[in-house]
């Protein structure tokens, strides 16, 4: 009889683990408590599935926190491998101007269909609407749910190896609810936190007409980190990939009342150049002078919002504000609105094969692990890479020749 392996979770890590296992003489059961697989991948693919990044590996791996833990797994399955894997599914890819890798058709649905078709064809069995409620070694407890997520049945199943790929704690509606944390001692977990998430700013009513508008070509500094890009002004604060990239620095600088963002509204001009332009004509209005300096209506509005009115008539002070505008953020949006979460099962709880040290034959992968990364293809790549690593760890545990 073939060894039986359970995979808990049908996201990127779980599906990649199942793919590896499907090539070997084992029986693979994938349990997913939602009605379908890869729901978070499909959501990400609505605006274009950024699956990885083409930058040099040394730069790529440095995006992760901690970067040394994942290096080995990423070396075994990085961007080049992902492109080849997509091609094997009949999905062509391309590299965007920023170096990000996408399917040519952008959307995720075709890739997911091809992936699930391959797994089904290899005999992987999927059990949807099955919530794993407890693990005791390799004995798993499940609740079987109906279409309304109401309980139909409860049962236990015994496996030769188990791979947990239950996701993080964001987007609860898509399946990542963090409920698995109750299975572990608290000293083995770093509490989950919102990552790749917008920040909160207490705007005045003056800013209401600008909600949804972009602040283009700015530079934001937090602590020692500084990046250029665009951000979106929202009713709750600021949102964009630029904000996500600075999330880690923001958390490091966060105090009881929040943290400061230092914004350069005109990165391509010096403070002296701006001051010279603003000082040329005394009789023009502030708005006219600011437009002449090169600020658009959105930048002018946020400049007025975040500077003392007493400074508006002082061109020297306004030039400094344009180059170093302080925006006070009070915190982050809720974890359920985050693209991903950091925190999870600590490195000390796992062997190099991602097997739990205290639970023989139980492996963990994906966003459950205590790592963090920005958007840009890094999240999916690490989930897939650790899913593969956990699968190979399970095969080694079962003494199956690889």
Image (cartoon, rainbow, N blue to C red):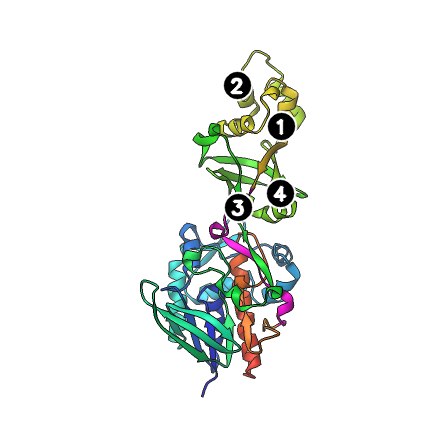
- Whole-Å distance between the Cαs marked 4 and 2? 39 Å
Query: Of callouts 3 and 1, which one flags the residue occurring earlier in the amino acid sequence?
Result: 3
Q: Nearer the viewer, residue 174 or 228?
A: 174
Disc 3 from disc 1: Cα separation: 24 Å
Q: Secondary structure at mark 4?
A: loop
* CA distance separating discs 3 and 4: 25 Å
Q: CA distance from mark 4 to mark 1?
A: 25 Å
Looking at this rendering, what residue extends furthest in the bottom direction? 1
**Could one spot residue 53 in this view of the protein?**
no
- Image quarter hosting the N terminus: bottom left
From the viewer's perspective, tell me whether residue 230 is left or right of residue 316: left
Tell me the SS state at disc 3. Answer: helix
In primary-sequence order, the first of circles 4 and 2 is: 4
Name which residue lies at 51% across and 60% down.
168
**Residue appearing at x 38%, y 72% in the figure:** 127
Give the mark nearest the N terminus, 2 or 1.
2
Q: Which mark is residue 241?
A: 3
Q: Nearer the viewer, residue 250 or 320?
A: 250
Q: Which residue is mark 1?
A: 321
Of the residues tagged 3 and 1, which is closer to the observer? Answer: 1
Quadrant in the rendering for residue 77: bottom right
Of marks 4 and 1, the one in the foreground: 4
Q: Which residues are magenta?
A: 331-352
Front label number (3 vs 4): 4
Q: The C terminus is located in which quarter?
A: bottom right
Which residue, as the protein is rendered here, is positioned at the far top? Answer: 283
Was residue 228 drawn as part of the magenta stretch in this picture?
no
């Amino acid at each position: 009889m073939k060894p039986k392996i359970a995979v808990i979770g049908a996201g990127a890590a779980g599906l990649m683990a199942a793919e590896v296992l499907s090539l070997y003489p084992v029986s693979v059961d994938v349990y997913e408590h939602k009605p379908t697989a890869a729901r978070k991948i499909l959501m990400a693919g609505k605006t274009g599935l950024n699956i990885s990044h083409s930058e040099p590996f040394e730069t790529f791996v440095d995006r992760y926190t901690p970067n040394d833990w994942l290096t080995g797994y990423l070396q075994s399955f990085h961007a080049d491998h992902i492109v080849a894997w997509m091609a094997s599914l009949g999905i062509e890819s391309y590299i965007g101007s920023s170096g990000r890798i996408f399917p040519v058709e952008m959307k995720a649905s075709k890739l997911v269909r091809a992936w699930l078709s391959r797994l089904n064809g290899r005999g992987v069995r999927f059990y949807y609407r099955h919530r794993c409620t407890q693990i005791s070694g390799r004995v798993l407890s499940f609740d079987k749910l109906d279409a309304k997520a109401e309980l139909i049945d409860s049962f236990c199943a015994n496996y030769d190896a188990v791979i947990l790929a239950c996701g993080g704690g964001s987007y609860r509606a898509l399946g990542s609810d963090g409920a698995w944390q109750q299975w572990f001692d608290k000293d083995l977990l770093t509490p989950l936190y919102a990552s790749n998430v917008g920040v909160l700013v207490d705007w005045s009513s003056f800013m209401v007409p600008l909600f949804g508008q972009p602040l283009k070509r700015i530079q934001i500094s937090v602590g020692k980190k500084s990046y250029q890009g665009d951000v979106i002004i929202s009713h709750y604060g600021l949102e964009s990939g630029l904000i996500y990239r600075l999330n880690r620095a923001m958390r490091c600088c966060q105090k009881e009342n929040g943290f400061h963002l230092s914004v350069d509204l005109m990165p391509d001009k010096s403070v002296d150049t701006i001051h010279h332009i603003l000082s040329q004509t005394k009789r023009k209005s502030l708005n006219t002078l600011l437009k002449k300096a090169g600020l658009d209506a959105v930048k002018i509005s946020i400049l007025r919002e975040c500077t003392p009115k007493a400074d508006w008539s002082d061109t020297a002070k306004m030039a400094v504000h344009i180059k170093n505008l302080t925006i006070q953020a009070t915190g982050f949006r809720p974890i359920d609105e985050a693209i991903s979460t950091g925190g999870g099962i600590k490195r000390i709880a796992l062997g190099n094969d991602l097997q739990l040290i205290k639970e023989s034959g139980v492996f963990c992968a994906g966003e459950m692990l205590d790592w963090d990364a920005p958007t840009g293809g890094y999240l999916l790549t690490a989930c897939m890479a650790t899913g593969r690593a956990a699968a190979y760890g399970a095969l080694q545990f079962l003494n199956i020749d690889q």
